[in-house]
Amino acid sequence: MAGGSNEPAETNGSRPRILVVDDDAALAEMLSIVLRNEGFDPYWCAYGDKALASFRENHPDLVLLDVMLPGRDGVDVCRDIRGESGVPIVMLTARTDTVDVVEGLEAGADDYVSKPFKAKELVARIRTRLRRLPAVVEEGEADTLLIGDLTISVDGHSVKRGGASIALTPLEFDLLLALARRPWQVFSREVLLEQVWGYRHAADTRLVNVHVQRLRSKIERDPEHPEIVVTVRGIGYKAGEPVRA
Amino acid sequence: MASVTRPASPSAPEAAPRSLAEPGAASTRTARLLTRLRPVLSSRWWTQPLGWWSRSLPLRVTSTVFVASVVVLVLGGFLLMQQATLGVLSGKRESAGNEARQAVDSAQAQLNATDLSGEVNVDKLLYDLAFGFASRSGGNEQYQVIISARGQTITSGDATADSIPAALRTQVDAGSDLLMTPTEVVYDDDRPPVAGLVAGSALTLPGTGRYAIFLVFPLTQEVNTLAVLRYAVVSTGAVLVLMLTFIAALVARQVVVPVRDARRAAENLASGNLHDRMRVRGQDDLARLATSMNDMAAEMEKQITTLSELSQVQQRFVSDVSHELRTPLTTVRMAAEVLHDARDDFDPVSARSAELLQTELDRFEVLLNDLLEISRFDAGAVELSAATVDLRSIVDRVLDAQGALIRAYGVPVSVHTTGDTTAEVDPRRIERILRNLMTNAIEHSEGRPVDVLLAGDADAVAVAVRDHGVGFEASQAKQVFLRFWRADPARARTVGGTGLGLAISMEDANLHGGWLTAWGRPGLGAQFRLTVPRRAGGLLETSPLPMAPRDLPVPAIPAMEEPGTPTRPEASADDTPAVLAGASPQGRGLS
């Protein structure tokens, strides 16, 4: 899983590699200037149909993906990349009110930034996605957590049902971990946005909804009747009761 | 919306006119009046049939035809009977007259021929005469003969002498002409008297004198004929009335059914089912009506489709423009940020230019977003995502977010809550409205305090933002919601509004089924009031808060709870900031 490669990059000296997929040359160049300035290593790809090849070639730590692309639609590109990697994907979208956002999120994008964005805002989003939750064992916390019939290894970044491990993207792992760490707490969407996505002000709760759906489709036995990520009507979500196999 | 045209005089009585100005007051009064009238109305038995009468066209047509045909047939039958009676009677009178003359003449001749030489039994003679006539008149009893002679009466049949009117008797005694008069024939048995004719004349028997002879013609047959005729007329009339009514009902139905179809089709069209068409049968007027209706529906459908296509094209265009504008704007904005961050290394002119570039780009972006939002409203592409929230929490959030602006203007802001202020609203839109109202209030406050009043009643929750700044003319209370409207075009624009804020707020309020009203007076400040129904989709009748501020005149505020509030607006200019700044800023109840 490519998700294993996005360790806090700043700490180990090498600059995080960011693939920018956008057909607008001026914006791409401007993004490159800003990103390089902020200590990232940007690569540019202008065509949707060449994005996957560029992704395979450059092994980026994060992908910035425009929705409208020549050659291949950004949502499809997102799905392609997600098909073979859990690397964080941030969509760049010009339309906040259409189905684009939801489509992009459903295709596997972790987050989105709507144009026109501020450079600082974008950099903050990128850093949040690269940083990850503190995935070290907290004081007084066991290395393994139980949620439903799943076993989460906090150190090992892995989720297992019985002996079989389930592949999650880093974001989905963070979401599950946030719930599992406080099984007694009901998380509102806003709290999850803050803890998992790093939004300090109210943001688009569709992010949470879509990613909970994606997470459920991977971990629940029956996504229609979830037992691990349980909906609390009118409030949010909570972890299901641990079940000893 | 009830516009308050109350003069700005501070001493004007406040409470009474304001309660009347509330939009719901009039309708409440009407409702109360109706409640009082209802028992009276329902006790009238005719209200129900009257309702049917006014609602049902076939009933109206049928009953009109029924009444009209009854009148016509009664009149016609009456006339017919009269004519028939007259005809029958005059015929009978004529034939009776002829017969009587003949009979009298032959009686006279018989008397004249009588041999009077011997002892004549006059009584016997007259008796024979009478019976002779009676038998001559045949078994069918055409007439009966009554002869009065010398104090005694000889009758040939069962009709008594009472059948002869006294007047006729006298006239016959006086003259010798044959006289005829209608009478009532009285029988000597139990039979009821019948109408009849009686003819009277005098017979002379030489030597013995005059005898009155009367011929009684009972009209039994004629009366029977007329009775049969009357029965026939009445029964035919009744049947005719029924048939006519039935036919009228049938015809009315025939007309009304297609008309009802047309009505149903029109209602369907009105409710948006543009595909509905009427059935066309035949080629009559109703069929043509159906055809016209269908043509109209088709035309409407075409127009509406065209319009909606146009609107889709426009929406698509706006969306595309947004995308096309946003990508270069992102680039420009990032470039401006880079320049702005590096401005310390520039010469003063370039540095200031970088700053201006940055701030104006912010404004440009806000304007672009506002324009897009307005175009979304225009395209009808907005929907309410309602959630139950406490409006107080939204107010707190807005104040929190605007802390910097509030501090920059040095405006004391206080919030007063009364009652339950939770409502089913779209929090994002309500926040946008309140943010906008707060920004306006702070920017126009001129440093004087701003009050935020929240109140809830059973059906509605209201938030009013009151400032004591420059205010505006009462006539501008509607114009402030117009797009790009500016209170004073000559006034320099220092604060960066797009001119669309209140227009968007109005659209947001309308989307909730709520009200957004403005009140302002030059020098007295302004108050903007947002009222939303407590439940999404609810209808507003009244607002828990008045449209005009409560702090204007003396009696509006109980002295106990608001000791520091100025009683006169003039006083507020200087006193208020100090007073309110000292008061607890949040959560005080305002009854």
Image: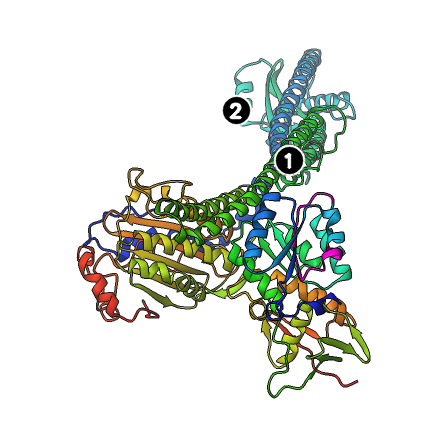
Residue B209 x %, y %: 59, 17
Q: B393 or A26, which lies in front?
A: A26
- The residue identified by callout 2 is B167
Q: How is the image coloured?
A: rainbow
As helix, strand or loop, the secondary structure at mark 1 comes to: helix
Does B48 sit left or right of B541 as displayed? right
State which quadrant residue A133 falls in: bottom right
Q: Residue at the spot x=42%, y=41% of the render?
A: B483
Residues in magenta, as a range:
A55-71
Foreground: B196 or A150?
A150
Which callout, 2 or 1, points at the residue further toward the start of the chain?
Answer: 2
Q: Kindly identify the amino acid type of the residue bearing the numbered disc 1.
A: Glu
Which chain is indicated by disc 1? B
Residue A68 belongs to magenta span: yes
Amino acid tagged 2: Ala
Measure the alpha-carbon separation of dots 2 and 1: 102 Å
Residue depth check, mark 2 versus mark 1: number of the one nearer the observer: 1
Q: Tell me the subunit letter for badge 2.
A: B
Q: Nearer the viewer, residue B31 or B224?
A: B31
Q: Position of residue B469 (x, y in %)?
A: 26, 52
- Tell me the SS state at disc 2: helix
- Inspect this view and state whether residue B39 appears: no
